[in-house]
Amino acid sequence: MDQMSKKRTAAKTSNTWNKEEILRDYYIGWLSRNISLLGRREVLTGKAKFGIFGDGKEVPQLAMAKVFRKGDWRSGYYRDQTFMLAAGMMTPEELFAQLYGDTDLQANPGNGGRLMNNHFGTRLLDEKGEWKKQTEMKISSCDTSPTASQMPRLLGLALASRYYRQDEKLAQSDFFSKKGNEVAFGTIGDASTSEGHFFETINAAGVLQVPMAISVWDDGWGISVPNKFQTTKGSISEILKGFAKEGDSNGYYIYKASAWDYPELLRVYHEGVDKCRTEHVPVLFHITECTQPQGHSTSGSHERYKSPEQLEEEIHRDGLVHLREWIIKEDIAEADELDKIEKEAAKDAREARKKAWKNFQQPLLDKRDEFIKMTDVTTCSCAKTKKIEAIKSDLAKIGEPIRKDILSSGKKILRLICDACTNPENSLKTNVTTWLEKELAEGREAYSSHLWSESENAVKNIPGIAPVFDEKDDLVPGREILRDNFDKLFEKYPELIAFGEDVGKIGGVNQTYEGLQEKYGSLRISDTGIREATIIGQGIGLAMRGLRPIAEIQYFDYLLYALELISDDLATLQYRTRGGQKAPLIISTRGHRLEGIWHAGSPLSMVINSIRGVHVAVPRNMTQAAGFYNTFLASDEPALIIEPLNGYRLREQKPLNLGEYRIPVGKPETLKEGSDLTLVTYGSCVRIAEDAVAQLQEFGIDVELIDVQTLLPFDVDHAIVESLKKTNKIVFFDEDVPGGATSYMMQQVIENQQGYKYLDAEPKTLTARDHRAAYSTDGDYFSNPNAEDVFDVVYNIMHEYNPQRYPKIF
Ligand SMILES: Cc1ncc(C[n+]2csc(CCOP(=O)(O)OP(=O)(O)O)c2C)c(N)n1
Ligand SMILES: [Mg+2]
């Protein structure tokens, strides 16, 4: 650490306190407090929908901000507003803009109105969706609301510093890191430490020894539930003592300090973060005696569960009050000067509120006025009917109109316009329709963009490159195709890393990374503990810092442990930041058709309905699987690739252009053309379908077999409906539950692609049973659909269609 920043951190030079800096802290503390107080009022008076604030946690955050440098990361929660102000990462106006849900990205850059207030996120991407230089920014990864969901991501953010320090090639650039000197700061409430994600992360970071600095803001409560019901012995630092580093052991530096003790907080943050940064040892700061001057959030009042004595005691414990007393006691400033600062802070908070509100409201008022003016036409008498006038006057009376008020008035007016209103020039109908179209498009941009990447490297822009084969080559086991393809990829992408349970030393349970750890080192191909949630968090954090992780979940069924993060964090990241952040993580797993309840690998509807925003590829063999890795690595988006579990030993022709060929995403492949019926499936079910199709052919039924290849996105060019136009009959087949992924496919084809227009027979789904798959071959037979079931379903449709030609068999 250089001398200058040492001075800054200590706020003290040769035993004299740096007055200017301390008074600045005092000002920011009070500015933040006033924002909390005003913010709550904004909700109570109806200007904002919900509010949660940082009051009572100001002082420790002032200390944390002092040791937070450019290139550092935060992964925290809604209490950190003082930190964000003190670190210069947010302005007071932006805090209010968030509270109102302002969709103006200039005013509310973190998320453009998509998230409730105090969910902090730095814009890491430029307008084109490309990375900005991370070492020149102080960065907050964008918050998520589920308690402790910030923790697994934090692990990856911290771990990235290790890669940038220890990998020679990566250490050469200073774009994402300066030789791994960045600390990832985590914050969490005392009650949220009860979550599994917290403990899993703590353990993993202790094993990995990463520069992670976690602060627990301990106010003794998780909404209305006190500490004693949350934490054994009522103290997180007490029970984490076993994690403390001892001598040469791995582990943590653990600090405990009171939230009102400013000089001590400066000391512990300075010392702890310094060690964390230089030694790459994780640090835990247990900050006790935080308060909640206004209770938990605007959703309730703490008078309901805190006794009058407890409420009174909190007032005396207030960190800002103690800071004031300390400043006076240390002779740094006198009471008058502090009074002035407090007044100034209150005034600045009020002004910020006013400006942010005007910025938010004025465009809406203008929109409303413009709308009313635009409806004021005289070309047709219907424009002046009583009903329409009433709608307009109701709209004009709304003091604080929002988009919804205006649009809903527009739609209601449209219903009342007479049919004669066809004059294209300035007729009410034309005006209102044009207005609605424009406003709805604007609303879609504000609220529905960036579920998927909109950059040049979006998956949809990555064209396919066909695999090339030498017909003379022998067939090889499928796993070798994956292994040799990975080999090419590790060579091609220095930032590529892979990890998971058993991935390192033995190269994966199916040996798809065989020999690669020896070749590329144990940093790039590594084993992890059994900890699915943090395997995913590790991947998210690493991907956000410019690395290209493949995080392996050993079996698809175990993805459930990590689903919360994939759904809440990974899938929403681009969306919730409106294109401000991304994590191009590839999740690799294997599924379909092994045996028993927890290895069936088939509950696809579990993912397709919860992780929109992540691509889902369901390759039928390893050639296709390898091609998907190649495609997704060329893109900047997250993906889940489910390798077909029973295909590792099956022999396939090995492509010559490994690492290069790319399977296009969202493009089904027709594996066999046919004229009688379209059979749609994916993954390992393709092989069963092929068997059934051959059996059906013997009975004169010519099936067209389509492998959808990816479920998200699904058939982007609407190829399946083209098949249906020819066959007029369709079956959707998989081994998910009834109403699962087959119903999704059916909705896509019958409704989205308008397939219903071409049906000559009832469209059918063929699925597994409602229960999970039982053990053994017979268990599978009675749980999952098999080739005979496919035969029966298809044959019976043909029988219904033409009973003479296809007499009933079964
Ligand atoms: C997974 C999950 N469960 C429940 C909630 C609802 N919730 C929001 S905050 C909160 C209490 C958190 O308390 P603590 O971690 O001590 O933080 P504090 O608000 O006291 O700073 C709860 C239960 C949630 N957001 N996520
Ligand atoms: Mg708490």
Image (tube, rainbow, N blue to C red):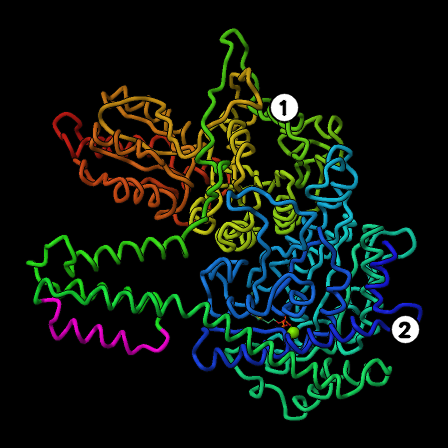
Q: Nearer the viewer, residue 609 or 212?
A: 212
Q: Is residue 236 visible?
A: yes
Q: Residues within 10 Å of mark 2 (few under 14, many from 20)?
A: few
Q: Is residue 480 above or below residue 73?
A: above
Label 1 or label 2, whichever lies nearer to me, is 2
- Residue occupying image coordinates x 55% and y 63%: 145
Q: Ligand 1 sits in which quadrant?
A: bottom right
Q: Residues within 10 Å of mark 1 (few under 14, many from 20)?
A: some
- Amino acid at circle 1: Lys
Of all residues, the one furthest to the left in this rendering is: 420
x and y percentages locating residue 447 in the rendered image: 41, 56
Determine the image quadrant of residue 727. top left
- Amino acid at circle 2: Thr
State the mark number for residue 457.
none
x and y percentages locating residue 17 in the rendered image: 86, 73
- Residue tagged 2: 16
- Residue tagged 1: 488
Region in magenta: 382-400
x and y percentages locating residue 371 in the rendered image: 26, 65
Q: Is residue 691 above or below residue 310?
A: above
Q: Secondary structure at mark 2?
A: strand
Q: Magenta stretch: dominant SS?
A: helix
> Cβ–Cβ below 8 Å for labels 1 and 2?
no
